[in-house]
Image (tube, rainbow, N blue to C red):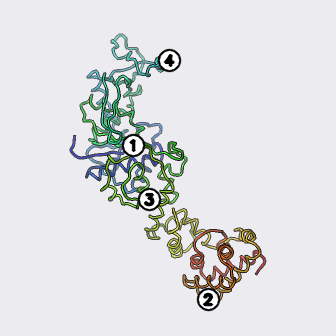
Amino acid sequence: MTDELRTRFAPSPTGPLHTGSARTALFNWLFARSRGGNFVLRIDDTDTARSEKRYEESILHDLTWLGLTLDEAPGTEGAYGPYRQSERCALYKEATAELLSKGLAYKCYCSKERLADARAELLKAGSPPRYDRRCSGLSPSEVPTGVNPVVRFKVPAGSVAFTDAVKGDITFQGFDISDFVIEASDGSVTYNFASAIDDALMRITHVIRGDDHLSNTPGQILVLKALGHTVPEYAHLPLIVGTGGRPLSKREMSASLATLREDGFLPEAVINALARLGWAPGDEGLLSLTEMARRFDLKKLSRSPSVFDTERLGGFNRAAIAAAPAEVFLPQVEAAFPVADSAWLVRAVTVVKSDASSVKDMIDMIAPLAGNLESDSGVAELLATLGSGSGEPLKALLAEIEGISEITEESAKSVLSAVKKETGLKGRSLFMPLRVGLTGVATGIELYRVMELLGREESIKRLQAALGSVGLE
């Protein structure tokens, strides 16, 4: 076993990277970096029917987007590759053969029907459903012909105990662990077996994973000991839950990294939100990955499930957006407004980003200001709901803007002050008609910012159209 600390993230490429898996990757990365170790990406693609190359590529893209640099991975080869389980089958065959030769595993020829009947009998008797080892001592004459057997690991008597870095001391009784299958009848190995062999051969020192894998641990420890490998240290992370304490649904907006990215969340915000799922770094502000690694400690992780708080994510994203230059968001914003001037979009983003929780928010706030206000935008209907007096502030604002040469922040504030003084209106009675007339919507950024972004000519054009829509040209 190497003295170098090594962690691994081993996702199955059967779908987009889930938020819970991203948290697991983050904690493995932070722990490795906190101790000067290596972070390894292994693709666990033993499920050949569901594994797809596109999902492997999306996982790599998501990890890169988050900023989690890889020391070893497919395409970033190291001394312990290959890094896809589908390319390591010969290693599993060697391990299976060794266990069989030592009498620590055996071939099982039982049919599915026989196993189902035996399981039902045990459950009926109130016993745990474990295999009865019928095939463990078959003589050559008893071996059926024409049957492709599975290979079972022979679980020894006694208990399996280990200290989990998160959960503390844990003990599993050997009697409760059935002789589990390590190789299927078609010759493929099971995930649980392959994962243990890979951890050993890749010299993984710490296995940090979700506690849905806790039940896999005793079997993996037994396999490693049977083959003479050093057992890594384990840390099982409580699951992430959604609303009401239920497991995070794949339909929830926070379920996958791809969804969060598409909704305009920045990697800095996502990383900070994920880091707080079971860990308290001692600072509620935005932290860099480097600072997180400096503070990270497995012993300080919570033993309780963590709720993914979308409001907290929004708060981190607001802070990340406010700190970033407007140009960072230009590609996404330009895609939403392909005919808008790029320089104007940079100005618009600069104005709205301090009030945005995501890029999507920015786009929504810019939309009423970009291009021409459509005639069917509902301006007349909105103005009608404000009452017959809505035309007075519109006419006053139009007259004031026509009297200036350009709209700047200073002149816009001066114009609004003049309209307020002239009409004697204030609050909703003053600003709502003006906002609707200029943008066609009832909410948005401050009015002087609206006027500054629209400019003199567009503001005049929109106000004239609004007055015309209610018959007050």
Residue kind at label 3, given as amino acid type: Ala
**Residue 54 visible from this viewpoint:** no
Indicate which disc, 1 or 2, sits on the residue closer to the N terminus. 1
- For the residues carrying marks 1 and 3, which lies nearer the camera in this image? 1
Where residue 455 appears, as percent x and y from the top left, is 59, 80
Q: Disc 2 designates what residue?
A: 404
Q: Which-is-in-front pick, marks 4 and 2?
A: 4
Q: Which residue is mark 3?
A: 269
Q: Are marks 2 and 3 in contact (CB under 8 Å)?
A: no
Say whether disc 4 or disc 2 marks the residue closer to the N-terminus: 4
Label 1 – label 3 distance at C-alpha: 24 Å
Q: Residue at x 44, y 70 (%)?
A: 325
Quadrant hosting residue 420: bottom right
**In this figure, which residue is indicated by the disc labeled 4?**
124
Horizontal arrangement in the rendering, residue 331 relative to residue 139 (left or right): right
Q: Residue 183 location in percent, x, y?
A: 37, 28
Residue 165, placed above or below residue 139: below
The amino acid type found where label 1 is placed reads: Arg
Q: Amino acid at mark 4?
A: Lys
**Residue 34 as seen in the image, left or right of residue 399:** left
Q: Quadrant of the C terminus?
A: bottom right
